[in-house]
Image: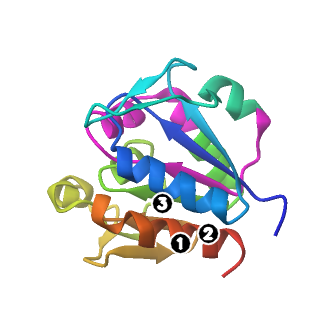
Amino acid sequence: MAGKRALVILSKGAEEMETVIPVDIMRRAGIAVTVAGLTGTEPVQCSRNVIICPDASLEEASTQGPYDVVLLPGGMPGAQNLAESPAVKEVLKDQDSRKGLIAAICAGPTALLAHGIGYGSTVTTHPAMKEKMMAGDHYKYSEARVQKDGHYITSRGPGTSFEFALADCRRTYGG
């Protein structure tokens, strides 16, 4: 089980539970998780005012790949920041080209949409993001709490964070 690696991209306004629960569960499963700050290594204020300290900047972490899984938390404006980032696009395109696992929760899948990742796959999101995700018919939508399709895993929100994290671990280890 040793040797698996995950990259969690953290942006100001990310949802705390969707960040911390997957990081905790993956680390307990023996996955080496790097929490990468989108704008650097400064502490990041999340959507409910919890402060999280990144392990590295995204710029630094992106040179230390490849990763078995790249995870995008939701939360607003965190997901919007991920969707607008050229650096996130580059990381996702690289991960996608290798068929590496890409996991996104809540509003996080909107970054996949913005960067043209996973078109044609079945996804789920926070209910408030459904209309945005379905615009343009790039995805099929599922009401599942956690949706797996190929090398993509998406989930609904804070209340599904544990299920999402466990699905990420299972898929990372080949399950």
- Along the line of sight, the residue nearer the viewer: 121 or 66: 66
On screen, 153 above or below 131?
Answer: below
* Residue named by callout 3: 118
Residue 46 location in percent, x, y? 34, 33
> In the displayed structure, would residue 67 be above or below residue 164?
above
Does label 3 or label 1 sit earlier along the sequence?
Answer: 3
Q: In which quarter of the image is the N terminus?
A: bottom right
At x 53%, y 73%, the residue is 167
* Residue 142 vertical position relative to residue 40 in the rendered view, above or below: below
Element type at mark 2: helix
| Residue interval drawn in magenta | 64-90
- Amino acid type at circle 1 is Leu
Left or right for 24, reference 17: right
Q: Which of 152 and 49 is in front in this view?
A: 49
- Dot 2 corresponds to which residue? 169
Which residue is label 1 attached to?
166
In magenta stretch: residue 105 = no
Q: Does the magenta stretch include residue 87?
A: yes
